[in-house]
Amino acid sequence: MGRATRSESRLGIVITLAGTGADQTAVQRISAKVRSETFDNGQWTLVSESTTTYLNDSHNFTGNTQVLEEIGRDANGVEQSRIVYTIGLMLVGQTTFDAQHPVGQTYLFGQDGHGSVRQFL
């Protein structure tokens, strides 16, 4: 029997945290789970599974939902990476925490007069 591979993405619109802060900013956590499986000898076998959770600010001054934090976990729920975004009038920078940068690697975005990112600092 042939060997096949499939990937399945499910967006879990399950809000695990919702509320308002003192400044009336609503935040919510939304998770996306991705599974990769192989089909061999009439049976599907799980190859990998990961979940990414986003902390979103849906009521900010821009009128658009903005991601404040992104957390990647493996199938066992162990955190593999975390990205914290710094937002002002635009995205100012991000700090990435992972195995190579356990104390965090910060990138600041240098923008031109039109708001396009031109350099990383």
Image: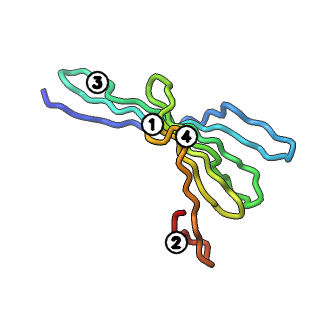
Residue identifier under label 2 = 118
Q: CA distance from mark 1 to mark 2?
A: 28 Å
Q: Which mark is residue 99?
A: 1
Rendered location of residue 76, percent (x, y): 46, 22
At 39% across and 32% down in the image, what residue appears? 35
* Pointer 4 or 2: first along the chain: 4
Q: CA distance from mark 4 to mark 2?
A: 26 Å
Residue identifier under label 3 = 44
* Pointer 1 or 2: first along the chain: 1
Q: Amino acid at mark 1?
A: Ala
Mark 1, mark 2: which one is toward the viewer? 1
Q: Crowdedness of circle 1 by 10 Å Cα count: few (<14), some, many (20+)?
A: few
In this view, the residue farthest toward the bottom is 113
Could you tell whether 78 is left or right of 43 in the image?
right
Residue identifier under label 4 = 103
In which image quadrant can residue 93 be found? Answer: bottom right
* Pointer 3 or 4: first along the chain: 3
Q: Quadrant of the N terminus?
A: top left
In which image quadrant can residue 107 be found? Answer: bottom right
Q: CA distance from mark 3 to mark 4?
A: 39 Å
Q: Amino acid at mark 2?
A: Arg
Mark 3, mark 1: which one is toward the viewer? 1
Could you tell whether 88 is left or right of 9 in the image?
right
Residue situated in front as seen by the camera: 48 or 106: 106
At 77% across and 44% down in the image, what residue appears? 26
Mark 4, mark 1: which one is toward the viewer? 4
